[in-house]
Amino acid sequence: CIDQYILGNQAGPGSMAGIFDGIDIDWEYPDNPGNGNPYGPQDIQNYTNLLKEFHTQLNEASEKTGRHYLLTTATPAGQDKYQKLQLGQASRYVNWMSIMTYDMHGPWDATGPTDFNAPLYADPRDPSPPPANSYSANRAVSDYLAAGVPARKILLGLPIYGHGWTGVPNINNGLYQSSPTMQPAPASAVAGTEDYRILETLSGYHGYRNQTTQQYWIFNGTTFWSYDDLTTVAVKMRYVNSKELAGAFAWSLDGDDTAGSFMNAVYSGLHKR
């Protein structure tokens, strides 16, 4: 990776130098199953060792080129996953950790309960089974800090998309509902997931806000979508500033509208210190 993409030797010596300013490690997730991947407890130390090795080799590349290179890593927001990691030790080797504080609930739980994609705080009334009922951005950030990760190395993740179900009982405005007839909501690309730019333009829906989780959702009597609207973004940016975190990141840019409304809200919110 260093030789090909950082030193730029993939198509000939130095032919691609200067294109990349660093490397991001996204391992989902050490010592956790996923799509049939082999995994085991050795992943934990291997993850830390991997970051350390990239850190060493990027520093060596810097000595050759005179440029500073970034090493970042995307990290889990669920405590059942990040509590396995050597967070404090691993953080020594990276410029920042991008906590993926989204996809906490979604239509992979096909029959529910309907729940929030990216709650800032946990709701004690959340009917999801443990540990998912206590997933939240605040829980993750607090635990990372307690594990020794400096605030200046933490980025809060935001989704530029939402998750949804259809066939939802018309109770409690669709929130926290379960039914054997529920299924992922129809969407433009993948059922159950839709871009912010499209969700903001849907007609026939009413919007609601949960003051505990600081999450927004829309419901039309049968279809439920949870996503971050611009008010939610503003609340989360105030949280980032109050915790003196490094900043925020979002996934992914193609979900924003043509005016860049979502990312403009992130930018303006971060600069209101």
Image (cartoon, rainbow, N blue to C red):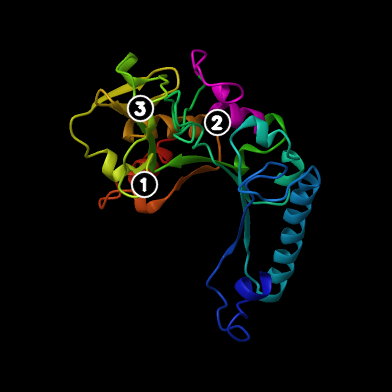
**In the rendered structure, are the residues bearing label 1 and label 3 in contact, judged by CB atoms less than 8 Å apart?**
no
Q: What mark, if any, has residue 263 been given in the picture?
A: 1
Residue corresponding to mark 2: 243
Q: Residue furthest left?
A: 204
Residue 190 position, x and y percent, is 38, 47
Find out whether residue 262 is within the magenta segment. Answer: no
First to last magenta residue range:
123-144
Q: Nearer the viewer, mark 2 or mark 1?
A: 1
Disc 3 marks a residue whose amino acid type is Tyr
Closest to the observer: 186 or 268?
186
Is 45 placed above or below 81 here? below
Can residue 227 be seen at all in this image of the molecule?
A: no
Of marks 2 and 3, the one in the foreground:
3
Dot 2 or dot 3: first in sequence order is: 3
Q: What residue is shown at x 34% (from left), y 50% (from top)?
A: 189
| Quarter of the figure that contains the N terminus | bottom right
Q: Along the polypeptide, which appears first: circle 2 or circle 1?
A: 2
Q: Which residue is disc 3 drawn over?
A: 216
Name which quarter of the figure residue 176 lies in.
Answer: top left
- Residue type at the position of mark 2: Lys
